[in-house]
């Protein structure tokens, strides 16, 4: 019964325990390796016992750790599980097939540290950040588990996911946040949110009575996305015309920005963001379809060419109506955030009274 309940909630049995064991093994292996001035580390090990997640086992771990001295403090580590893909077809759709790593999880961990970092302070930071680190490791292990259970992803889904991350540095804050929300609520990330939440609650010892307050505090992005409004985003852009002028001064728009009124400027910024995002998606889609040097050099032929052309044309509906692009995003964010909140709410059933 417990296994079925966990699966229904979206938290595979044993995944948080696996995250805790990986955290302990990570410390046990990494801390003795730390050296003054060395920022790159490779750690390979076999757990004393395999990490069991549902009906899957992980019996080998490879970690690339980077201490990145570009911060003014010891920050939370950024993690990513390594995926190796090959292009394939499922029906009429091109998909990225996950290559089975035979029980091996490969992790990249990037930890911000100050320029004058010390070994003792790195160790203290790792120890202090247990809650976040166990949650992040459980998050990545869930990605690995999902890859094993669904060993393929549609190319367009991966292309959109990557394109959203590439908009994180767009110089208009309101638009940048919208694309971050799209990334945060992407199905690739949504599938791991319940595991991430349950890990934090379990590590902190929070039961049912503290669930709602913690959920509101930790997952405010989901709450905000339910209230996302294109109209409010546009009003925020109007309130920061200095940023608008700065962006337009760096882009060849064929006119002097002094000749434009505020409405024309804001409309240009919205179009620039749309063009950037759609170009990123097209580029990522094309890159994902390539599986040999000839295609990379001369392009696609046959069915691939038709698929690529079809994907490119899917953006035509926005060319004469850029606001529809943003309104469709608004609809997606509101609908998806509501679904994610319901998923997260189910974690309540796993907690002690």
Image (cartoon, grey):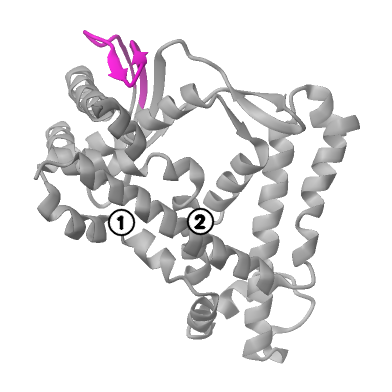
Report the front residue among 43 and 202: 202
Residue 51 picture quarter: top left
Q: On the picture, is 145 further left or further right than 128? A: right
Circle 1 SS class: loop
Q: Residue at x 37, y 31 (%)?
A: 142
The residue lying toward the viewer, choosing from 55 and 327, is: 55
Query: Percent position (x, y) of residue 33?
Result: 22, 19
Instruction: Specify whether 248 is left or right of 217.
Output: right
Residue located beneath label 1 in the image: 219
* Secondary structure under the numbered disc 2 in the rendered image: helix
Which residue bears the numbered disc 2? 182
Q: From the viewer's perspective, is 311 left or right of 147?
A: right
Q: Quadrant of residue 76?
A: top left
Regarding residue 301, the answer to whether it shows in the image is no
Q: Is residue 131 shown to the viewer in this render?
A: yes
Q: What's drawn in magenta, residue-wise? A: 42-64
User: Where residue 118 sits: x, y (%)?
Assistant: 17, 36
Residue at the image position 77 percent from the left and 54 percent from the top: 314
Q: CA distance from mark 2 to mark 1?
A: 14 Å
**Callout 2–callout 1 Cβ contact below 8 Å:** no
Residue furthest out toward the front: 1
Q: Which residue is found at the position 29% from the left and 33% from the top?
A: 6
User: Does the magenta portion include 318?
Assistant: no
Q: Earlier in the sequence, mark 2 or mark 1?
A: 2
């Amino acid at each position: 019964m417990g296994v079925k309940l966990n699966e229904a909630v979206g938290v595979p049995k044993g995944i948080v325990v696996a995250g805790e064991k990986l955290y302990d093994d990570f410390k046990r292996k990494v801390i003795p390796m730390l050296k003054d001035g060395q920022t790159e580390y490779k750690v390979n090990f076999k757990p004393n016992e395999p990490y069991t997640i549902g009906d899957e086992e992980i019996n080998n771990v490879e970690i690339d750790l980077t201490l990145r001295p570009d911060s003014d403090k010891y920050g939370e580590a950024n993690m990513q599980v390594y995926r190796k893909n090959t292009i394939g077809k499922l029906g009429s759709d091109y998909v990225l097939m996950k290559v089975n790593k035979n029980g091996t999880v490969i992790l990249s961990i990037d930890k911000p540290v100050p320029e004058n970092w010390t070994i003792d302070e790195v160790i203290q930071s790792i120890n202090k950040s247990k809650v976040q680190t166990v949650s992040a490791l459980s998050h990545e292990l869930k990605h690995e588990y999902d890859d094993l259970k669904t060993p393929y992803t549609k190319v367009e889904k991966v292309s959109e996911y990557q394109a959203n991350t590439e908009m994180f540095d767009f110089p208009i804050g309101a638009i940048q946040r919208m694309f971050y929300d799209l990334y945060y609520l992407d199905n690739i990330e949504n599938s791991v949110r319940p595991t991430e939440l349950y890990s934090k609650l379990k590590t902190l010892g929070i039961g049912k009575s503290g669930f709602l307050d913690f959920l509101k505090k930790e997952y405010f992005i989901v709450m905000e996305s339910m209230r996302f409004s294109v109209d409010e985003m546009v009003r925020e852009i109007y309130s920061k015309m200095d940023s608008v002028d700065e962006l337009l001064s760096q882009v060849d728009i064929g006119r002097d920005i002094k000749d434009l009124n505020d409405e024309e400027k804001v409309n240009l910024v919205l179009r620039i963001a749309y063009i950037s995002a759609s170009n990123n998606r097209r580029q990522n889609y094309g890159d994902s379809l390539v599986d040999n040097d000839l295609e990379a050099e001369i392009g696609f032929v046959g069915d691939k060419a038709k698929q690529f052309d079809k994907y490119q044309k899917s953006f035509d509906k926005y060319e004469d109506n850029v606001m529809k692009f943003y309104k469709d995003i608004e609809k997606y964010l509101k609908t998806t955030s509501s679904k994610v909140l319901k998923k997260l709410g189910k974690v309540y059933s796993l907690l002690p009274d």
